[in-house]
Amino acid sequence: MTRPVDHPAVPAPKIGVLLINLGTPNAPEPGAVRLYLREFLSDPRVVEIPQLVWKPILHGIILRTRPAKSAHAYRQVWMEEGSPLAVHTARIAAALADSFGPEAIVDHAMRYGQPAIAERIDALFAMGCTRLLIAPLYPQYCGATTATALDEAFRHLRHMRWLPAVRTLDPYHDDPAYIGALAQSVRASIAALPFAPDAIVASFHGMPQRTLELGDPYHCHCRKTARLLSEALGRELIVAFQSRFGRAKWLAPATDEVLAGLPAKGVGKVAILAPGFAADCVETLEELDIRGRKTFLDAGGSDFAYLPCLNDSRPGVEMLRTLVGRALEGWRPDQ
Ligand SMILES: C=CC1=C(C)c2cc3[nH]c(cc4nc(cc5[nH]c(cc1n2)c(C)c5CCC(=O)O)C(CCC(=O)O)=C4C)c(C)c3C=C
Ligand SMILES: [Fe+2]
Ligand SMILES: [Fe+2]
């Protein structure tokens, strides 16, 4: 009879915190943008029309025309270190690095492109993490963002023999820590402006109206964020939805139409923020700060300010420290 062998000393469990954002091209060039769009727009969580109908449109039209147009947009906002979304997401992860004790490793991944979710889960596991918090950096839940990030993580976990214990970060659209961070950030940005805005616009990324009708909570989450932020600021916010894509009806009102209509309503000075984006990216910096500004000024507005996302600002990082810290409760021996 063989005697059971004692298991070698098991080290204290380590925690991996994996922040996930959307992903972005490697370069502001049509080829790199095409690769990125092909992966992103082939995801059935993002484009919810039958693949048999969608694939010929994607490959026959979109991927032939959009990469050059989008590359132009990316070029205008590209930073020395890379795409703004990648740069800000990496900075957020770096700022959180030592926040949860020596047993926790903070890392980041992208749903599309690099660093890939599978690769970072493997790296965390190789570093000894037997507990994993998957944290999609989307305050408002949407199938097209939150769910697909989680899908991808679980798809990879399926192949692992020895699974870590897994938790996921809740959407945080109505969390007082998030609303407080937004309010603090907006107040500070507005105090630094050379003008007092007549109106503040909260612009969220849009999605098809049909997705709302199918039961996705994203629209309700956006509305609730805006209501709570408006209460915290003690002033009205105009809610709008940007980044319309394709021919279907998207959530209304559209940000560009709202901006074009404000001067005729007596709003000459406007400030705009994008509370649904954890990090500034092409959608905020090019679509709002460059194109939105032009739309508003061309329509007769006199002053326009784009208020930056939370990024790795002090209130933004403090907010994530609170949310992630709470999600790790009971896992950290130092608590
Ligand atoms: C923040 C939430 C987001 C939702 C909801 C969302 C839905 C969604 N997006 C598209 C199509 C595109 N989005 C693009 C860029 C983009 N989208 C988000 C976030 C959400 N998208 C971010 C953070 C970014 C920026 C990426 C970057 O590299 O900086 C693009 C690519 C840019 C372009 O070509 O215009 C497309 C296309 C759909 C169809 C969709 C559906 C619900
Ligand atoms: Fe998008
Ligand atoms: Fe856009």
Image (spheres, rainbow, N blue to C red):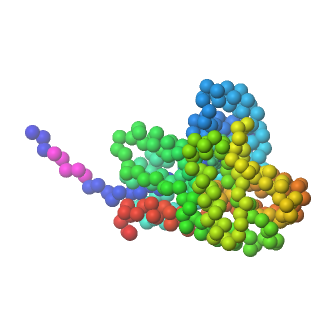
Asked if residue 38 lies left or right of residue 293, the reply is left
- Asked whether 5 falls inside the magenta stretch, the response is yes
Q: Residue at x 54, y 43 (%)?
A: 148
Percent of width and height locating residue 57? 69, 29
Q: Residue at x 67, y 50 (%)?
A: 205
Foreground residue among 298 and 228: 228
Percent of width and height locating residue 277? 64, 55
Q: Residue at x 37, y 61 (%)?
A: 331
Please identify the quadrant where the C terminus is shown: bottom left
Asked if residue 239 lies left or right of residue 165, the reply is right
Q: Which residues are magenta?
A: 4-8
Percent of width and height locating residue 320? 54, 63
- Asked whether 41 falls inside the magenta stretch, the response is no
Magenta stretch: helix, strand or loop mostly:
loop
Q: Please, is residue 231 above or below residue 278 in the view?
A: below
Q: Is residue 112 visible?
A: no
